[in-house]
Image (cartoon, rainbow, N blue to C red):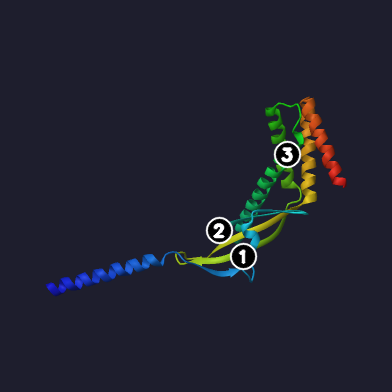
């Protein structure tokens, strides 16, 4: 009886040790294939970057089973990152432009907000280009089929960004003209003239 008890204790000890070893092994991912021969490009970790001639923005998705869907979702994420960053930039530009006007603060806020909304719409239909796709095909030790990690790099030129701002300013002029808001329309016209002058330089 003592021998049986000892054998049972030994079997239980080995089982517990085996389970513990299995738990320590944990999640592991193995890269099966990548779209480049080198490591991940630097742009993967930089969601927005400004250059003299324009802007670059990236976005990505991970653990996607369908490659085409993953590229589409990563591109949408990149564009969202770019538009949000450009909204912040144009908010600063439009706010500086209207500083010192006689408009009350809430009217200034609405003027800038309308400009940003119009700019965002213009950006989506203007010059955003998909530049590059980087993907990793990987498989973890706990899944049956491989998955994809995908990043997309997009860009817009400084010229197309300026065109989008001009379109936004023109729409501000039209809006405040329809509303018979003379002061807001006048500031929008001044902005439009300034941007058009910048375009001819």
Q: Earlier in the sequence, mark 2 or mark 1?
A: 1
Q: Earlier in the sequence, mark 3 or mark 2?
A: 2
Secondary element at tag 2:
strand
Which residue is identified by label 2? Answer: 62
**Quarter residue 134 falls in:** bottom right
The residue at 61%/58% (across/down) is 45
Mark 3 or mark 1, earlier in chain: 1
> In this image, 1 relative to 46: left or right?
left
Q: Residue furthest front?
A: 100
Q: Are marks 3 and 2 in contact (CB under 8 Å)?
A: no
- Quadrant in the rendering for residue 180: top right
Residue closest to the eye, 7 or 51: 51
Tally of numbered tags: 3
Q: Outermost residue, right direction?
A: 200
Q: Real-space Cα distance between discs 3 and 1?
A: 35 Å
Q: Which residue is mark 3?
A: 118
Q: Secondary structure at mark 1?
A: loop
Q: Residue under circle 1?
A: 40
């Amino acid at each position: 009886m003592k021998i049986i008890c000892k054998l049972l204790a030994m079997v239980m000890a080995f089982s517990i040790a085996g389970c513990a070893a299995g738990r320590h092994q944990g999640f592991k991912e193995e890269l099966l294939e990548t779209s480049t021969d080198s490591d991940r490009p630097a742009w993967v970790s930089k969601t927005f970057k400004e250059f003299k001639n324009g802007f670059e923005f990236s976005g990505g998705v991970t653990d996607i089973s369908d490659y085409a869907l993953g590229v589409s979702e990563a591109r949408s994420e990149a564009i969202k990152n770019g538009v949000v960053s450009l909204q912040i930039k144009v908010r600063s530009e439009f706010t500086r432009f209207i500083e010192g006007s006689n408009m009350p603060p809430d009217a200034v806020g609405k003027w800038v907000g309308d400009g940003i909304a119009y700019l965002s719409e213009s950006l989506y239909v203007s010059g955003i280009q998909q530049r590059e796709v980087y993907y990793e095909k990987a498989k973890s030790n706990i899944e049956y089929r491989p998955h994809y990690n995908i990043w997309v790099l997009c860009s817009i030129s400084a010229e197309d960004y300026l065109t989008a701002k001009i379109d936004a300013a023109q729409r501000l002029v039209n809006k405040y003209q329809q509303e018979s808001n003379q002061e807001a329309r006048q500031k929008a016209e001044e902005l439009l003239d300034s941007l058009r002058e910048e375009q001819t330089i």
